[in-house]
Amino acid sequence: MKIAFIIIVIHFIADFIFQDEKWAVGKSKNVGDLLKHTTTYSCLWLLPMMFLFPTNYVLNSVLFVAITFLAHTITDYFTSKITSKLYAQGKFGSPIPNLGFFSMIGFDQVLHYGQLLLTFHLLSTTV
């Protein structure tokens, strides 16, 4: 449970605090902005992972960063296009079921949490 909380906090810092506004706005239309964001995001995981993995910490940390880079890039590629379209249409929310802009951002975050926790678990138990 403690590790899950740490992973969520690191994700918040890496995905929001270290995301330039230009990248956040541009990643839905510009692959360069997307890659700047996902590269920065993924690299920020390297050092914390070296302290969180109980064994094979260097290999596991590098694998974690590589898997996270790929997964985060794919996820943001699609979700940023959807959120950008919803934002442009002014669809911030909707009657229940609410499938607007903010719900899509929440869905994006759930995908990231799932990937991070699953990757950490699998690498901790298999490598």
Image (cartoon, rainbow, N blue to C red):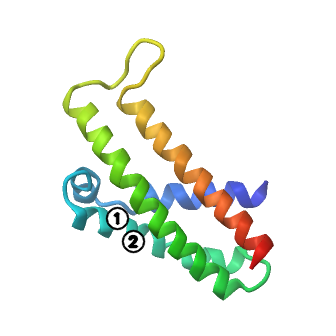
Q: Residue at x 23, y 25 (%)?
A: 90
The N terminus: image quadrant: bottom right
Q: Is residue 83 above or below residue 100?
A: below
- Dot 1: element: helix
Where is residue 63? Give x, y as percent: 59, 78
Rate crowding at label 2 as few (under 14), some (14 to 19) or many (20 or more) other CA atoms within 10 Å. some
Q: Which residue is mark 2?
A: 40
Question: Distance between the Cα atoms at labels 2 and 1?
Answer: 5 Å
Q: Residue at x 55, y 78 (%)?
A: 46
Q: Is residue 17 above or below residue 94?
A: below
- Say the numbered circle drawn on residue 54: none
- Say the numbered circle drawn on residue 37: 1
For the residues bearing labels 2 and 1, Cβ distance under 8 angstroms: yes
Looking at the picture, tell me which residue is in the foreground, 98 or 1. 98
Is 99 left, or right, of 20 in this rendering?
right
Looking at the picture, tell me which residue is in the foreground, 37 or 63. 63
- Dot 2: element: helix
Q: Residue at x 45, y 60 (%)?
A: 72
Find the residue positioned furthest to the top.
95
